[in-house]
Amino acid sequence: VGRKREAGGGGVASKRQKTEDTPIFSRHHADKAQELSKKFHAAAPFPHLKLDGFLDPDFALALRDELAHREFQIKSTDLFHFFQTKDLATATSPCVTKLREMLYGLEFRSWLSTVTGIPNLRDTADISSAIYHDASYLLCHDDHLEGRRVAFILYLVDEDWSESDGGSLALFDTDTSSGSETQRPLPGTVVKKLVPSFNSLSFFAVSEKSFHEVTEVTVDRGRMSVSGWFYGDPLQYLDYGAEKPMPWAAPIAPSPASSSLSSLSQWINPTYLEPSAQEKIKENMLEESTIELEDFFQPEKYNLLVEAIEKTASKWRRVGPAIKRRHSALALSDQPIEGAEPIRDVLALLSSADFTAFLRNVTSLDLEKQLSEAEQYSTGDYK
């Protein structure tokens, strides 16, 4: 069931009325196609451009106010979380109609082809409006879909929006160790952020290197935008190279049938080792398939673990590629790390036969292999 969301962050209508034939695309940009083309192609990590003052400012205000009264439905998966209108390709409200007809009209498409060097851009409209509120995000991807050639975002945010509010368009470089004549390169790290500003347009060429994301919004007000794609002659994309297989351990030997799991009591809250508690956990797992166990470790062991994480802060390394995961990890098998003993101990515990027996008891699952890693997640991280 869709959710209607108030736009927030915008919605002040222009006090000055515009005539129907008033140009809405700033002539300042319209007359500089050749100059902008040089900037577009010189931009790193892939061709892109951000234009401030893209539309007539009064029209931009009227557009924002008009969109604020539309219905936005929640869109949420592992890859993204935000609010979005239905496709605006057939919308009939005046400002949206005028914007769409301008963007996909022959004059603007010809201008865009000159700037990007991409010919034969179609008049196929693929356009919608989105609002990113507190904790909204869009993770790393490349926008590749059959025929997409140019992606664009028109920002209608509050005039005082800043980088600390989140919602920036973050651009990734590519991992120089990946990619070949037969394989696509993988994303590397964020090397540039385009911060939203009112009435600015950002656009880029969609390619096998156009990895980008929208950083998590950190304020409870709307980051409103209108975005979409221009379609053209489709590109041929290579496949990604195969990843190294996950280092699953050999099958775990089951604990002796007589084991009371007492060896776990040094680490784990004894409440969770009681048969009655495990039975309740199992019931919840069967019904919900997930559970959160509070105060799971003994307090003194937990404190030792936190101290070890702080002591080893400089040893944690980033893990990717960003199209699949992004977090920090501690590689304990490479070499001894001073102060990491409690982390090593808890990984040994989680890999033990007794802990596997505990998991079997509370899940009723036949667990055969295990993989225990030290991972750390910050804002914007995921797996």
Image (cartoon, rainbow, N blue to C red):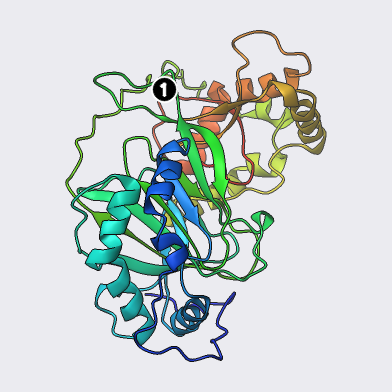
Res. 316 in view: yes
**Near-viewer residue (93 or 61):** 61
Mark 1 residue type = Met
Residue 86 is left or right of residue 293, and the answer is left
How crowded pointer 1 is (Cα within 10 Å; few <14, some 14-19, many 20+) is rated as: few
Depicted 59 relative to depicted 278: above or below: below
Residue that carries the numbered disc 1 in the rendered image: 246
- The residue located at (30%, 63%) in the rendering is 108
**Near-viewer residue (321 or 162):** 162
Res. 140 in view: no
- The residue located at (65%, 54%) in the rendering is 163
Quarter of the image for the N terminus: give it. bottom left
List x then y, in percent, for residue 288. Answer: 45, 56
List x then y, in percent, for residue 382. Answer: 52, 42
Secondary-structure class at tag 1 = loop
**Near-viewer residue (370 or 212):** 212
Q: Residue furthest top?
A: 335
List x then y, in percent, for residue 238. Answer: 24, 29
**Near-viewer residue (374 or 100):** 100
Depicted 13 relative to depicted 259: above or below: below
Residue 333 is left or right of residue 184, and the answer is right
